């Protein structure tokens, strides 16, 4: 029973990663977007601003880049009518969520592999604490964002809706990230991962 | 009807106590009286969100279909009270600190985040067609709301230690007995007001849906 759950999750995550490898739709736009945002921020920041200000902008850039990826996350499922098939499939519905969250996390991590060095070059060096905070934040962004993304594609407004749903929930992540409160980010991840995992099946309930 | 009468009596009593009985605050003067509106409204708004989340839980757990509309109405009232909280908070901030908005006030910032969160609730609800999926989706989002309250409160406290390290102290002196009594009456009045409005809006929604069913039967 347990093994099949892990198998379902890996199969679903693998499907997303393979699709992305072949179609190259989401990840390149995320990469270009994050670099473009950092460039805009360079001009938005007055000369000689402090470390905290630049770090704050890094977090804004990361959250917006994540939003860009999240809006695309369930588009294929909706457009190709894949949701119905997934819901009918003999797997636990939360496996759909976990598989998608893992692939979103992977996209985010790849985008940050480019974004963090770019930030270090453009602005200032990065501490290990910030990198750890980014990783912890990615978990929260991926889990909560995947659940909200599934909600947003069900509506008529779609891309318009997700930022509205997601940003209030991202406020604690930004606070934890800018302040470097690793314990707080871990707490956020724990609470919202459990909540998303428990409630996802209601979000994709038969349509 | 009884509830509406009780609300009227309590509201009248609260207004009388606030404006004629409770002594004027020696520090802040007359303007401190807005406290008896602002804080009860804020607490009532939390109660609305809590009630909405409880009903949301019933939607998911018991598959209770009536609870969906109840949850929506409670959150709708919560947003109305929340808007009033932001407004009265802003007025109080202007009078007592000289600014319309203070990021240093935890409660005000928390309310802004919550207010934005619940505004998105309406966007979500109105962008999905009515039915079971919409009910469960709204319910899940409403549950996220009550979890977000303590998490953002903690986050906002933390963000303060980043900028203003001294906010972790308690809020000034204790209330006098007369002040506490006035506050309690005002809060009870606000809660009754919420219960009345909740009943009225719910009845309205029910009549609406009955009317729609009848129309469909006719056509």
Image (spheres, coloured by chain):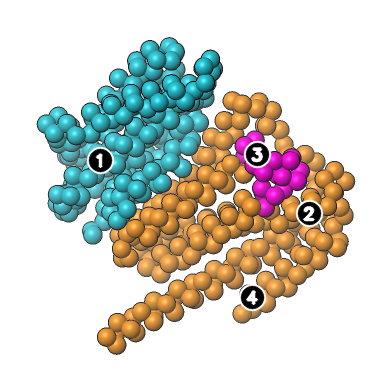
Q: Earlier in the sequence, mark 3 or mark 4?
A: 4
Q: CA distance from mark 4 to mark 2?
A: 25 Å
Identify the hue of chain A.
cyan
Is residue B42 shown to the viewer in this render?
no
Q: Label 1, on which residue?
A: A73
Q: Between label 4 and label 1, give the one nearer the viewer.
A: 1
Q: Position of residue B109 (x, y in %)?
A: 58, 41
Q: Between label 3 and label 1, give the one nearer the viewer.
A: 3
Q: Position of residue B158 (x, y in %)?
A: 57, 30
Subunit bearing disc 1? A
Subunit bearing disc 2? B
Q: Label 4, on which residue?
A: B4
Q: Label 2, on which residue?
A: B33
The verdict on a common chain for dots 2 and 1 is no
The local secondary structure at tag 3 comes to loop
Q: Label 3, on which residue?
A: B102
Subunit bearing disc 4? B
Q: Is residue A134 above or below residue B12?
A: above
Q: Between label 3 and label 2, give the one nearer the viewer.
A: 3
| Quadrant where the C terminus of chain B is found in the figure | bottom left
Q: Between label 4 and label 2, give the one nearer the viewer.
A: 2
The local secondary structure at tag 4 comes to helix
The verdict on a common chain for dots 4 and 2 is yes
Q: Start and end of the magenta stretch?
A: B88-106
Q: Are marks 4 and 1 in contact (CB under 8 Å)?
A: no
The residue positioned 32% from the left and 53% from the top of the image is A157
Q: In terms of depth relative to the viewer, which is nearer, B9 or A39?
A: A39
Q: Residues within 10 Å of mark 4 (few under 14, many from 20)?
A: some
């Amino acid at each position: 029973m347990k093994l099949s759950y892990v198998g379902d999750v890996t199969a679903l995550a693998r499907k997303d990663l393979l699709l992305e490898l072949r179609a190259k739709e989401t990840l390149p736009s995320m990469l270009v977007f994050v670099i473009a945002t950092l460039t805009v921020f360079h001009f938005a920041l007055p000369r000689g601003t402090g470390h905290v200000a630049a770090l704050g902008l890094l977090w804004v850039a990361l959250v917006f880049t994540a939003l860009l990826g999240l809006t695309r996350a369930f588009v294929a499922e909706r457009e190709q009518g894949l949701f119905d098939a997934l819901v009918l499939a003999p797997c636990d519905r939360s496996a759909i969520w976990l598989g998608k969250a893992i692939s979103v996390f992977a996209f985010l991590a790849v985008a940050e592999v480019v974004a963090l060095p770019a930030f270090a070059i453009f602005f200032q060096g990065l501490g290990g604490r910030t990198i750890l905070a980014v990783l912890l934040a990615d978990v929260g962004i991926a889990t909560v964002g995947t659940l909200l993304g599934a909600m947003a594609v069900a509506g008529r407004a779609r891309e318009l809706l997700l930022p509205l749903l997601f940003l209030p929930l991202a406020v604690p992540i930004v606070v934890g990230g800018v302040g470097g409160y690793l314990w707080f980010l871990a707490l956020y991840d724990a609470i919202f991962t459990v909540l998303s995992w428990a409630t996802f099946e209601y979000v994709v309930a038969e349509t | 009807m009884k509830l509406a009468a009780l609300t009227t009596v309590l509201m009248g009593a609260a207004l009388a106590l606030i404006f004629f009985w409770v002594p004027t605050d020696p520090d802040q003067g007359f303007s401190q009286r807005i406290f008896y509106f602002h804080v009860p409204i804020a607490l009532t708004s939390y109660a609305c969100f809590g009630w909405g989340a409880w009903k949301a839980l019933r939607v998911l757990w018991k598959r209770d279909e009536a609870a969906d509309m109840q949850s929506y109405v409670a959150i709708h009232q919560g947003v109305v009270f929340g808007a009033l909280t932001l407004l009265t908070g802003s007025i109080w901030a202007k009078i007592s600190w000289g600014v319309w908005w203070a990021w240093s006030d935890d409660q005000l910032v928390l309310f802004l985040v919550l207010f934005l969160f619940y505004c998105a609730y309406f966007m979500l609800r109105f962008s999905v067609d009515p039915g079971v999926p919409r009910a469960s989706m709204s319910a899940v989002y409403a549950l996220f709301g009550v979890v977000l309250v303590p998490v953002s409160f903690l986050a906002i406290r933390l963000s303060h230690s980043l900028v203003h390290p001294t906010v972790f102290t308690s809020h000034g002196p204790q209330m006098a007995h007369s002040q506490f009594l006035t506050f309690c009456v005002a809060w009870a009045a606000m809660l009754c007001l919420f219960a009345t409005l909740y009943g009225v809006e719910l009845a309205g929604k029910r009549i609406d849906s009955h009317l729609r069913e009848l129309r469909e039967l006719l056509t």
